[in-house]
Image (cartoon, rainbow, N blue to C red):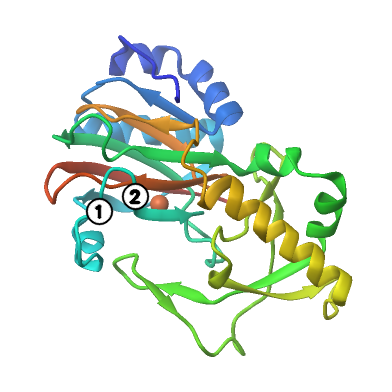
Amino acid sequence: MIKKIYDQTFESIIKNISSYVDLFLLDGIICFNQLNLSTEEQLKLMDLLSKFINFQISGTPHTEDHRHTFNRHKEPISPQDLFIEWHIENIHKETPETIACWNMTTCLTKSGAGDTVFVNMENFYAKIPEQWRIFLKDIKIKSTVKTDNNGKFLFDNDLSKTAEQSVVIVHPVTNQLVLRIPIYDDEYIVSSYQNKNLNKNDLTMMEDIKKYIKTNIADNKNIKERIIWKQGDLVVVDLFKMAHAVYGGFSAGDRILHRIWGYYNV
Ligand SMILES: [Fe+2]
């Protein structure tokens, strides 16, 4: 479970901002229990964090009621199944939105439903076998998906104009290596290793890595980094390195969050 921070106010956070910056950079996420910030306070907090962490606030604040995700599902999603599948935010974009501040303004979800789960891809990369770590540094992929304005995935059949991207990236603030690879293997093709086609051994190693990611993230129902939401909770998360997913078990309108995006200057 992600440890929530209790009994704070907007003023107490501002007073101790540098300790929260340290926590954010270390864990990739900070979660305040029932902080109940106003939109104005949320914006002020993000503005202050952006000065310490060096990111830009992106676009206008948005109220997310998951309407578009509900439209995507024909059947209700149970609390044991994923409502939003695993992803690293906007991985296919050159300048992805990577920092999110989520203010859960409405949460009527029953306990055990609608949890958000995370895997820190900086820690994940650090723990895989050294041979894979070295190999992945020279792997490039092409994303087979794009997102429309509603964040809906669209598969892209023509990859001739799609740029290759590395999967091991230096984090712009922590300087640690992060594995930024789609969690599901139909969302990309592996386009090169050391700028050449992959040979048989390379392909085998890549298959082993994909299987490892599937077992340990996509199919793993026991992810420990989990938020059980309460109304008024406020989360600031580094989506450059935090892969995440959301479980079902709630209805439209049960779970509304106010979101502010930021992106790193990469
Ligand atoms: Fe997301």
Give the numbered dot on residue 86: none
Q: CA distance from mark 2 to mark 1?
A: 6 Å
Name the residue rendered at 84%, 75% in the picture: 195
The x and y percentages for residue 160 are 62, 90
Q: Nearer the viewer, residue 240 or 179?
A: 179
Is disc 1's CB within 8 Å of ligand 1? no
Residue 57 in view here: yes
Quadrant containing the C terminus is bottom right
The x and y percentages for residue 72 are 25, 67
Name the residue rendered at 64%, 39% in the picture: 173
Give the numbered dot on residue 77: 1
SS type, badge 1: loop
Name the residue rendered at 81%, 53% in the picture: 132
The quarter holding residue 155 reads bottom left
Query: What amino acid is at disc 2?
Result: Asp
Query: What residue is pinned by disc 2?
Result: 81
The x and y percentages for residue 101 are 36, 39
